[in-house]
Image (cartoon, rainbow, N blue to C red):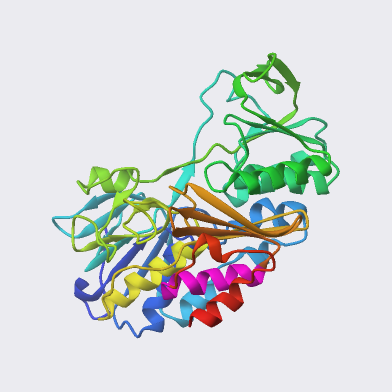
Amino acid sequence: MAAYTTKGGAAAMTVVVVGAGQAGVQTAASLRDNGYPGRVVLVGDEPGEPYQRPPLSKGYLEGTADAARLTLRGSSFFAKNDIDFLNTRVRRIDRDRKRVLTADGDELAYAHLVLATGSRNRALPVPGAALDGVFGLRTREDADVLRDRLGAAQHVVVIGGGFIGLEFAATAAKLGRSVTVVETVGRVLARVASPAVSAHYTDLHETHGNRILTGRTVTRLLGESSVTGVEVAGNGPDLVLPADLVVVGIGVIPNTELAADAGLAVDNGILVDECLSTSDSNVSAIGDCAAHSSPFASGPVRLESVQNAVDQARCVAAKLTGETAPYRSVPWFWSDQFHTKLQIAGLANGYDRTVVSGEPGAFSVFCFQGERLRAVESVNRPADHMAARRLFAAGTGLHPDDIDDGFELKRHLASAG
């Protein structure tokens, strides 16, 4: 069993990063950007070079973005920046000895450990979920299989009306496939956006030929070896939807098993403090797997976004190079569907009032809790989105009554500054 140390022969300066997604790769890169002198080891358990996930449901699936454009950082970057990238799986953390044990039988000694283990798709808990033709969409391998299957699919059903489900449905429609989206609650995007945005995206998909069924629950998938139908109940008569391709997008589960087995505090994510340290000060957690405090939420929150992954990685890298500061980044998200871009700044939860500004097809929804602005959702209004991010970062106030016909957030921000 080999034990890896720094090139100087001691593990006192080694940072091991577990997870080679957006958060993990950014951590390694930012450590070098900040002049970290010790050994940096990045461990990823997916084959090949680290890649970005957002294009998988859009350009990559559609065929307008090839595999090379997915790459986050290639082997030349790791070599140039003296980052050791290992394709293997970490099976255990030994916090007493400050080592991680890999599936290859090696040990990696660390001075600091960064867990960027991400998340995995939530499984569909109904009979027939294991039939051929039923897929999730999270990895490049998933997208490769779906791209091949879409070419021959006649009846496509998407289970889940969140970002991934709707982005896949939009891409499938652009490729000439008609899709039925089944959502359990009363509207699509209910977990992440306001009713006005949900209504807009329902209309958008139906205009492009997709069928949206809300308030419906999938009770089972039909078929012998391959899926042939989806049985749906609720909000009307029971239905059997013909299906030869089913995509399941019903949320994700944070990968916390390594942390939990090591005795770290876990609750819907690896619990971290305001500087992203776990219950062990020698271990940090970032990205999809981490539950952190935020000035934009009333309690610990776990965010699944590129922005959060990148900003938390930079925060941890700064901490490890002597510039410790609380994580206070403004959360923001985006989704591309058809010709429409949705951009959200802030967190649209806990709001009790919305004010809409703009026109059909290009508008922003301002979400307030009392008189406090919680989020700004912008559909084809990029200037509003950028202004909203600056507004939240600066702590500039906005009252619901300030928003009238012709309101421009950029102008309000300028006058308030």
81 to the left or right of 367: left
The magenta stretch spans which residues? 382-395
Q: Which of 381 and 30 is in front in this view?
A: 381
Using the image as rendered, state which of residue 393 and residue 40 is in the foreground. Answer: 393
The single residue placed furthest to the left in the displayed view is 96
Residue 14: image x %, image y %? 26, 72
State the image coordinates of residue 173 (x, y, percent, origin top left). 80, 44
Q: Is residue 380 above or below residue 154?
A: below
**Quadrant location of residue 340?**
bottom right
In the image as oriented, which residue stretches furthest toward the right?
176
Q: Residue sitting at 38 percent across and 58 percent down?
A: 116
In the image, residue 332 above or below residue 180: below
The secondary structure that dominates the magenta segment is helix
In this orientation, which residue lies closer to the viewer: 282 or 267? 267
As for residue 391 lying within the magenta part, the answer is yes
Image-quadrant location for residue 239: top right
Residue 399 visible in rendering: yes
- 363 relative to 20 in the view: left or right: right
Q: Quadrant of the N terminus?
A: bottom left
Instruction: Pick whichever, 191 or 168, lies toward us.
Output: 191
